[in-house]
Image (cartoon, rainbow, N blue to C red):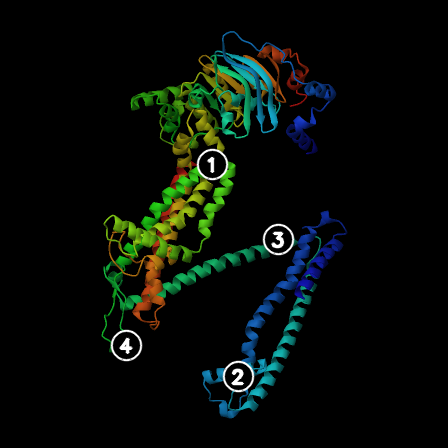
Amino acid sequence: MRAAEDTTMETTNDQAAGIPGGTQKEDEKLTSEAAIETVGDITVENPRIQCHNVDVFYGDKQAIKNVSIEIGRNEVIAMIGPSGCGKSTFLRCLNRMNDIIESCVVKGDIQLDGNNIYSKSTDVVTLRAQVGMVFQRPNPFPKSIYENVAYGPRIHGLVDSKIDLDEAVENSLRRAGLWDEVKDRLQQPGTGLSGGQQQRLCIARTIAVRPEVILMDEPCSALDPIATAKIEELMDELSQNYTIVIVTHSMQQAARVSKRTAYFHLGELVEVGDTRRIFTNPQHRLTEGYITGRFG
Amino acid sequence: MICLLAGAAFVFGRHRAYATSGKSISTLHSLPGHYGLYALILTTLPAVALLMFWSMLAPRVIEVLLLADLPAAMQGWSQEQLGLLLNDVRNSLKGYSVASDNPELITQFGERYQDMEQASNWLLWITVLSLCAGGLAWAWYKIRADHPARHRVEAVAVTGLIACSLIALLTTIGIVLSVLFESLRFFQHVPVTEFLFGLDWSPQTAIREDQVGSSGAFGAVPLFAGTLLISAIAMLVAVPVGLMSSIYLAEYASQRIRTILKPLLEILAGIPTVVYGFFAALTVAPLVRDAGNWLGLEVASESALAAGLVMGIMIIPFVSSISDDVISAVPRAMREGSYGLGATQSETIRRVIIPAALPGIVGGILLAVSRAIGETMIVVMAAGLAANLTANPLEAVTTVTVQIVTLLVGDQEFDSPKTLAAFALGLTLFIVTLILNIIALQIVRRYREQYD
């Protein structure tokens, strides 16, 4: 009981309290330095997204510090790190979901296919259609399964006729591996599906807008292992056509699904690299500490 | 006094529990506080009940005793005469001068009255205190380490809660029954069909037998038509305005504007309806009439339009406050899901948030409708008394509630069809709002099933 309390204390206070264990002093020294030099190669050939010196503030609090990274085409990149390290915040910068939060300010340069997404001429609506997002908890709309998937194509005017729409819905549901399970009950509410089905419905809904990049914010944290396995399988398939950025708490999941992994710590990008290398041969002390389970 | 005893009993109960447990809380069945409460309840509850009962019954008992040995000459007096006598006795005790036929009797009775009152008080205190002591002793006897005081205390608490909810229920039943019986009496004079389907309403009956007057016509259709007309106008104002303002407040307004605007809007709900009433009668009605005249329309100076407009304004806070709450309650995840697909704010509101919040919004609107139907003051002042059967909002109409008021403030005896008609109207109104509420619940439930 006491031990469990202690752990929660640490996770909520990890920014203030630092890291427990023998390395505390060294880690403090490291994190208190002006900036961490990111270890590993942040560049990729033929990048889709390029981030340079990104800072994010919530009011006075800085959540992301000077992060630079490139994300390639049809690449699955996992972002890992302890709670509060800013990985979700960073993910939400990529399709400007942080705009909804009033106190949030994003500085730096983020480019999608060479265009700065934070420039004035960028239309958030088009951006979010290009960069879709799947959330931590399945959040189907209170509509029928069909309407959930048809929502995106409708608001973006992607289809001309009912037949096209039917086709788009079927396609998206098929790609999300949900078609066979729901084809007989398309008119029933999406909220009536199981958690895993709901999450696949949300993925289908995202695909229906024909994005280029899919952001996934801990997509399996509310699901059981079987549903998780299905989603991971699906990610593998989707990676043939889409760039996928996934934030996850599960290192096994990162190891299973991603090609590259980025480790965040207290708002800074500590290490980036090939997933296998990160997990077998981490070069930064913090990365090693997290991966070997000394904190996080 | 009883409070002091109660406190003492609480402390005592705790100590007793402590003592019997061998100074260790963990061996007790319940927490020490429960034993304290247990002792407290046993000590005070019977005593308080007795106190209340006694103070209700004692005066009556004293009166009966007093009147039992009246002088022989007065034995044959009627109830009213005896009542007067007792009143005189009481007044003389309070020091008022009493004009009476035999002052000696009054003073004699006064003394005896006082004596008996004193005796009763003494008796009361003795019994109450002994009840307290008895309760305390019983608690002392009962409290052992394994005594389930917690269950006992909670049973008493539950009983208290049930009693409170029964009060509300019984009051409702009482109201319904009284209205129902008066209505039945009314329907002995006027057939139900005539009341429900008659198109003519003029409830003036003859006061004296020989008076040349109408026998009255009690067709309620014009009243319900008027009520519906005014409520419809009110809803036409309140629903769009209330809904739009709640959408603005919940979705677009910044935190600062919201903190200013929302209380301001809710002030509208706090304005007394009388104030709305004379605002409608003195400001809005002339405005409507002048505007109508300017357009070349003939407008009555007490028009349904004016009353409906003001009533609509009154209802805006009901609609907007409830809608605002349900819109704000739509989960954040729903908005993010929509924004994440590239929907704009207005698309998100129209296609996701409003459908999700619809059950609550419909509930709020129906609540506002029953409020509008039952509203009295505004229509009394602004809508007029003429029972016209019309759909023209520029004419004067009257409503059910207005007629109930006018029927009951008259000076006719209470069993004439005219006053009884008020109860029949009240019953019908009650049934209509009941049906509305049931429909509202059904709608809400159906949407719930679809959206949850």
Specify whether disc 2 shares its chain with disc 3: yes
Question: What secondary structure is found at the residue carrying circle 3?
Answer: helix
Identity, as a three-letter code, of the amino acid under mark 2: Asp
Q: Label 3 to label 4, Cα distance in Å?
A: 67 Å
Q: Residue at x 64, y 63 (%)?
A: B44
Mark 4 lies on residue: B208
Residue A45 falls left or right of residue B396:
right
| A25 up-or-down from B266: above or below | above
Whichever of labels 4 and 2 marks the residue nearer the N terminus, that label is 2
Q: Quadrant of residue B223?
A: bottom left
Whichever of labels 2 and 3 marks the residue nearer the N terminus, that label is 2
* Residue A155 visible in this rendered orientation of the protein: yes
Whichever of labels 4 and 1 marks the residue nearer the N terminus, that label is 4
Q: Residue at x 67, y 23 (%)?
A: A295
Question: What secondary structure is found at the residue carrying circle 4?
Answer: loop
Q: Are marks 2 and 3 in contact (CB under 8 Å)?
A: no
Q: Quadrant of residue A20?
A: top right
